[in-house]
Amino acid sequence: MIRVHPEPWATMVAHAEATYPNECCGAMLGTADGDDKTVTVALPLENAYTGAQEDRYEIRPEDLLRVEREARQRGLDVLGIFHSHPDCDAYFSKTDLENSCPWYSFIVLSIQKGKFHHANSWLPNAEQTKAEQEPLEY
Amino acid sequence: MAKILIPTPLRQYAEKNNSVEVSGSTVGEALANLTTQFPDLRKNLYNDEGKLRSFVNVYVNDEDIRYLQKDATAIADGDTISIVPSIAGGRC
């Protein structure tokens, strides 16, 4: 289960709507008790993909390094990554799976015609062959 | 000794340490010492062929070792090694 507090959730939705029709991305920080995660901070990141950003996103490793440092400074954990699917459902696509990392929760926000529609959270496996849906509360 | 920062989700495999001091003169030696000390970390960082998983990046201080000498990158006392995943994706 992953719970996102109202303030970080508002940050995530605002970032996803502001970047529409492109995909957005960002990191989620908070606390974890086993598989029970609580997101208290959302950090929007720049989509570094150099091609069509309405179909793809990419996070620079150095940006994630900065996120990890910020989390340590705040006494929080890096819990996951969020990104948007403009005018698509919040599934975990083949591209998402092939470029994922099993260490984190991946929240996908579906943005329909510029407005938030729905979201799902996914847990990919280490082989990048499948992802399980994770209960999401926001 | 260099310090390896352990990402949150991997701390469960490293006795909940958020960083570990390791010996070694190269990144490869330091990571080998880390995974000897905490064997459960190995399958999270390396694939069945013994290579770092495709989504694993390693930094020495602020430098990505892919642009240095990779596993053979020299490390000195006081260096900080960070393990950072590659993440990308898209709707199609």
Image (cartoon, coloured by chain):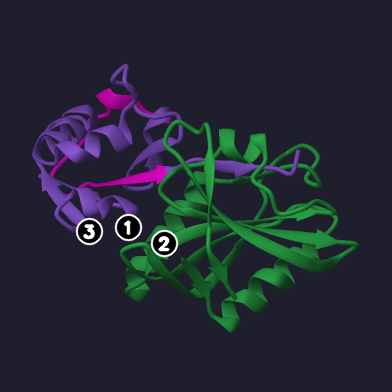
Label for residue A78? 2
Chain letter for the part of the structure drawn in green: A
Q: Chain of mark 3?
A: B
Residue at 27% of width from left, 28% of height from top?
B73
CB-based contact (under 8 Å), mark 2 and mark 3: no
SS state under label 1? helix
Earlier in the chain: of badge 3 and badge 1, it is: 1
Marks 2 and 3, Cα distance to the nearest angstrom? Answer: 12 Å
Give the residue pinned by disc 3.
Answer: B18
The residue carrying pointer 2 sits among few (fewer than 14), some (14 to 19) or many (20 or more) residues within 10 Å by Cα, namely many
Q: Which residue ends up furthest to the top in the rendered image? A: B49
Pinpoint residue B29: horizontal percent, then vertical percent.
16, 29
State the separation of the CA atoms marked 3 and 1: 7 Å
Asked if the residue under mark 1 is in contact with the one under mark 3, i.e. CB atoms within 8 Å, the reply is yes
For label 1, count other residues whose C-alpha is less than 10 Å away and answer few (under 14), some (14-19) or many (20+). Answer: many
Check whether the beta carbons of the residues at disc 1 and disc 2 lie within 8 A of each other.
yes
Lateral position of residue B7 relative to residue A8, left or right: left
Residue A88 shown in magenta: no
Specify whether disc 1 shares its chain with disc 2: no
> Which residue position holds label 1?
B8
Given residues A24 and B28, the one toward you in this image is A24
Chain letter for the residue marked with disc 2 in the picture: A
Residue B68 quadrant? top left
Q: Amino acid at mark 1?
A: Thr
Please name the amino acid that badge 3 sits on: Asn
Query: Which residues are the magenta region?
Result: B67-84
Q: Give the colour of chain B.
A: purple
